[in-house]
Image (cartoon, coloured by chain):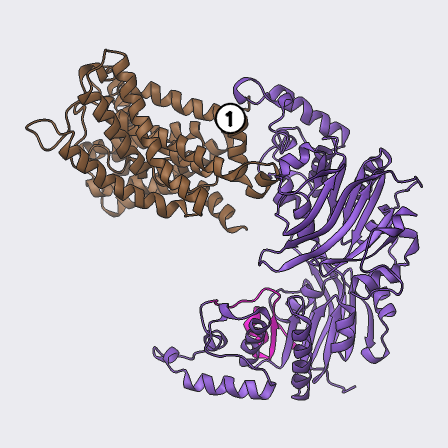
Amino acid sequence: MSPQPRVEMRGIHKVYPDGTVALRGVDFRLQQGEIVGLLGENGAGKTTLMKILSGLLRPTRGEIMVDGSLAHFRNPSDALRVGIGMVHQAFNLVPPYTALQNIVLGQEGAGPLASFRTDEPRRRVAALLTETGLEIPLDDPVESMPIGVQQRVEILKTLYRGTSVLILDEPTSALAPVEVHDLSQFLKRLRAGGKSVVFITHKLKEVLELSDRVVVLRNGQVTGEIATVQATPEGLAEMMVGRKVVARVSRAARPPGAPVLVVRDLRAANDQGAPAVKGLSFEVRAGEVFGIAGVEGNGQSELVQALTGLRPPTGGEITLDGTRLLNLNPLELYRRGLGHIPEDKARFGLALNFDLAENSILSRQGERTFLGALGRLNWGRILAYARDLVERFKVLAPNVRTVVRSLSGGNQQRLLVGRELSKQPVVIVAVHPTRGLDIASTVYIRELLMQMRDDGKAVLLISADLDEVVELSDRIAVMYEGVLIGAAKTEEFTREEIGLMMGGITPKGSAYETPASAPAAD
Amino acid sequence: MKRLPLPRPLIESLVTISIGLVAGALLMLLFDYNPVQAYRALFVGAFGSLEDILETLAFATPLMLTALTFAVGVRGGLFNIGAEGQMYLGAIGATFVAGLLPLPPGLHLAAATAAGMLFGALWAVPPALLKAWRGVHEVISTIMCNWIAFYLATYLAINFLAEPGRAERTAPALVTARYPVLTEDASLTAAIFVALAFCLVVYLYLWGTRAGYELRLAGENPDAARYAGVKGGKVILLSFAIGGLAAGLAGATQIIGRPPAWSLYATLGNVITLGFDGIGVALVGRNHPIGGVLAAVLFGALAHGGRFMEYHAGVLSELVRAINGLIVITLAVPELWMLARRRFSR
């Protein structure tokens, strides 16, 4: 390896203002003319590290060297000045502007007439196109272009600013397979031109195809660094997923009951209208936890929203205890026995500026118990119920008239989980139920879910935390790009196999086409 | 019943009002006026005698209602700035029933009041429907409706409701449709009791009923509202309808509850800007129905007492308005800050 790295990051720590520790002493090097894949699960710190390198975030500790000299980036412009540019997952393009206008935007030069002179920039952009081998219609508005082409515009925009270190955040997440192939060709041309590339991903296959070297992050630390030619999917998966030790919740063996929640060929689109859930079939039985693992953004949110009435499915069938449930609103679903612990409690599950009592009846506000004559709220009953929830689910709060915003995340989640469980649901859809919580709350909430299972409820657990899924689930499937890979009893998988599936590699012999059916039936 | 969420906002308001007063004093010093003398004139003018207090309250009456319009909108997550137009229509409704429909005493007053409220509410329905069905932003639609209401009200006042032989105002309310004046020396009428009662009812509705809970939930967190099965369209319609009732009542109080005119000027001069002023009152009152009442009294004091700054301390009327504006702005800062944070935090 050449002695002088193009970029070197040393001992980078990052603690966010809310106390979240994102990076714990990361060293990272990048040579000229090298493509590095930065691999890791959600929350491993990949994006944070690269935002620091591109000047968008400042490290809490640690230093950045560019071409051997110390650099301090106050903002992305500082990083651009030394040739470091980042293309984010969400593009920053002006939709009605043409590709050329978007590429040149902000770089028109000085003078009142600067923006009218398009011939000079056009020549420069055309030269860039030849150099990189990219093809884009320069005079079409960006909004009319498919995502893959928009991405090229975004990359060109960064290159136009003289970037020689290109950082790509999950560049393949929005691309079709053909486009991924094009991207790979393009990256190789960049490398041939002496540029360096870092791309962030969680997909094993792509990191193996596209990179020269792989750096694996887990929980804010580098857990592996390996030349791609020496890497194996199994080895990478283990570096990515690890073997964490946490307090375990015991799961007693118990024969599952009849299927309660049955999903057949469910389809749903994301906010952009693209298919996100591509024909899922599974069932959850009484007295079992069915866990869906997977890296976030593989359609889990859309699946949950389709199940819980927050997003109309585009096809398929959902039945609960034999009754079809489609196109019902969340309230009607709850009346039929569906409890929902949503993925983003601050967004869906709670009104943070309301107090505990008001939040304790959220979604139950129409129930007789809590109402008096003329639709009046029966505050006496509501307060008593809230106090009962606080006591039963060990919520730490000054009193039930305290605004929920002032509670810790763990206590907010206890309140929410308590409310959902006390509705006496038949099925519980729990999404990332312990994300961001302290250990005590995590263990407590997992115990509650096990309690529900032991009481004969059907629990659907969707979590990006593999340990959680393995610990709680009787059966496991992995969600990858809108489909379920391999549903089987938890014991039948090794962690490596699950890690591989999370990275999009189907283990031999698992049922890819018809998940969920055979293994559960024994 | 939920206790009033008042103490902290009240303290904040006291702090901010002192800042506003100091800023106003600096402004006066800059123009060589004596701030102590001027503020004494303001205070004595607004609260110095029973008559002055009643006059202050007369100014406050319509403002607490138009503030309610805006506040109920914000509580439901809407930026309803249509109080102005809804109030014009309320004034027209009241004028029509009070001036042209002879009815028995008692019933006449009630009918005129109800007509004002109903007209105001009806004028609030189109923007609500546009929002619920087509997603038309309520700021745009209510501004448009305000202008339509302005010309519609002027047209109706001149062509159909004008007092015979006098073009500048409408037929005055018949005696049977007038709220009783409380004392001969001030223009406050019993209309204030209706306004206060309405504010109280809305407060109880918002914090004491299921529908009010759902309205506040939709304003506080629309996603959680969806999760709780709240129907967005219903909330929009309700919030606008309540706001329209309040604004309509505000318009009506200026016709059948405010001597000496007892009628609508063809220029709309005796109602104009009351709706917009309500936005400021609501912000000062923290978008709370009861807070709005207190803030309206403050605005009334500035409006009535401000005249005495001019008479007794010789402060130029333009400067009086600037000083009042300063006080109002500083008072509105905390709530504006909250609103801005909520809007831009997502």
Membership of B194 in magenta stretch: no
Chain coloured brown in the rendered structure: B
Please tell me how crowded label 1 is: few (under 14), some (14-19), or many (20+) other residues with Cα within 10 Å.
few
The quarter of the image holding the N terminus of chain A is bottom right
Picture residue at 63% right of the left edge, 25% below the top = A367
Q: Which residue is mark 1?
A: B4
Q: Chain A rendered in what hue?
A: purple
Please name whichever residue, B86 or A215, is drawn nearer the observer in this view of the structure: B86
* Residue A368 in sight in this render: yes
Q: Chain of mark 1?
A: B
Question: Please, is residue A365 above or below residue A34 in the view?
Answer: above
Q: Name the spot of residue B98 as percent of width and height, x first.
A: 21, 21
The stretch of residues the image draws in magenta is A70-95
* Residue B44 in sight in this render: no
Picture residue at 65% right of the left edge, 81% below the top = A186
Please name whichever residue, B326 or B281, is drawn nearer the observer in this view of the structure: B281
Tell whether A129 sits left or right of B306.
Answer: right
Q: Name the spot of residue B287 as percent of width and height, x first.
A: 44, 35
Tell whether B127 sits left or right of A34.
Answer: left
Question: Please, is residue A487 above or below residue B201 in the view?
Answer: below
Question: Please, is residue B51 above or below residue A10 in the view?
Answer: above
Q: Name the spot of residue A262 as percent of width and height, x first.
A: 76, 44
Quadrant in the rendering for residue A365: top right
Q: How many marks?
A: 1
Quadrant in the rendering for residue B166: top left
